[in-house]
């Protein structure tokens, strides 16, 4: 149980917007030192200025989380300025949709690079530092939060590449939780599985690197983008509310963090499909009009 955040250090990737920025705002109010990392320089600069304005010590780092060397360099900078962090929010993520066979190699490399390897690099770079700090100080407490998605627990159609990446983050996080429990009682882990929350995830292509440029979008990708824009834009739960849930979960050492607990019914159906070896349930069964709309759009000549 972690109750005192004052003076502790948190590393946040994807800190220029969405959950990352909202967690930084909460951290600043709690008196934390904050390491803000983002791939978008203007968003990072704005976030750093705002968080410094709240009185927090800030280290701002522009980086692409998919690049191992950049995350390692950030790790060294954090250690030099603040020592081992107490909290790591592996939050940076990108979205991409469309029928799964229509995703290009560049699509796969971009999404897996950011969503999976970005989290893996964060875990790989910071966990050893945190374990070392715990060994040296019996009062040290730490926690790692990886941002997955409900897409890590469900498999909605027309967003396969994103589903694959987020299932990997859930698996990595569950394993991290178990692995940490083997070696320490001082460091915990959580996985954040938000549903549709207005964060900017649906516009992540704005930061897509030139060497992974997207091809002309297929019809399924345009349909997927439109549905994502609508769902994310109309989300009723705010990123700020979810960020508060994250801090509450850290304080309670709670592993699974949900933005929309009611959506767990769909996860239960999927797990029952697996247990009973029945064919996958329509993930839109709770909102059948979505599935009808998607099928009609894809089959239209």
Image (spheres, rainbow, N blue to C red):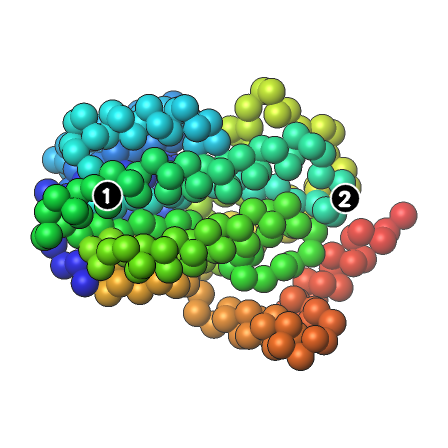
Can you tell which mark lies on residue 101? 2
Query: Can the viewer see residue 239 in this picture?
Result: no
Mark 2 or mark 1, which has the lower sequence index? Answer: 2
- Please state the horizontal and vertical placement of residue 210, each as a whole percent of the image: 58, 20
Along the horizontal axis of the image, is 98 left or right of 191? Answer: right
Work out whether residue 49 or residue 248 is closer to the camera in this orientation and state it. Answer: 248
Indicate the quadrant where residue 208 lies.
Answer: top right
Work out whether residue 70 or residue 33 is closer to the camera in this orientation and state it. Answer: 70
- Please state the horizontal and vertical placement of residue 196, each as a whole percent of the image: 50, 55
Residues tagged 2 and 1 counted as in contact (Cβ below 8 A): no
Q: CA distance from mark 2 to mark 1?
A: 40 Å
The secondary structure type at the circle numbered 1 is helix
Work out whether residue 27 or residue 211 is closer to the camera in this orientation and state it. Answer: 211
Crowding around mark 2 (Cα neighbors within 10 Å: few <14, some 14 to 19, many 20+) is few
Tag in front: 2 or 1: 1
Q: Up-down: is 106 above or below 226? A: above
Q: Residue furthest bottom?
A: 276
Report the residue marked by disc 1. Answer: 130
Residue under the point 36% across and 55% down: 179
């Amino acid at each position: 149980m972690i109750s005192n955040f004052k003076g502790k250090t948190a590393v946040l990737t994807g800190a220029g917007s969405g959950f990352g920025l909202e967690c930084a705002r909460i951290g600043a109010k709690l008196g934390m030192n904050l390491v803000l990392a983002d791939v978008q320089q203007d968003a990072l600069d704005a976030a750093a200025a705002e968080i410094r304005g709240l009185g927090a010590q800030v280290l701002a780092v522009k980086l692409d989380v998919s690049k191992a060397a950049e995350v390692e360099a950030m790790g060294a900078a954090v250690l030099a300025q603040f020592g081992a962090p107490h909290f790591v929010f592996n939050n940076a993520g990108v979205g991409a949709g469309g029928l799964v066979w229509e995703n290009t190699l560049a699509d796969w490399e971009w999404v897996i690079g950011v969503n999976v390897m970005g989290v893996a690099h964060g875990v790989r770079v910071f966990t050893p530092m945190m374990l070392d700090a715990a060994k040296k100080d019996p009062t040290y407490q730490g926690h790692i939060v990886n941002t997955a998605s409900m897409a890590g627990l469900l498999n909605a159609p027309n967003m396969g590449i994103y589903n694959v990446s987020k299932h990997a983050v859930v698996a990595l996080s569950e394993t991290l939780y178990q692995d940490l429990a083997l070696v320490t009682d001082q460091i915990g882990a959580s996985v954040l599985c938000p549903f549709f929350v207005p964060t900017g995830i649906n516009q992540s292509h704005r930061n897509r690197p030139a060497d992974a440029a997207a091809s002309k979008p297929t019809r399924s990708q345009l349909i997927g983008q439109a549905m994502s824009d609508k769902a994310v834009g109309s989300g009723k739960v705010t990123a700020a509310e979810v960020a508060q849930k994250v801090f509450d979960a850290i304080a309670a050492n709670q592993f699974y963090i949900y933005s929309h607990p009611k959506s767990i019914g769909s996860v239960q159906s999927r797990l029952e499909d697996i247990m009973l070896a029945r064919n996958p349930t329509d993930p839109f069964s709770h909102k059948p009009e979505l599935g009808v709309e998607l099928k009609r759009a894809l089959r239209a000549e």
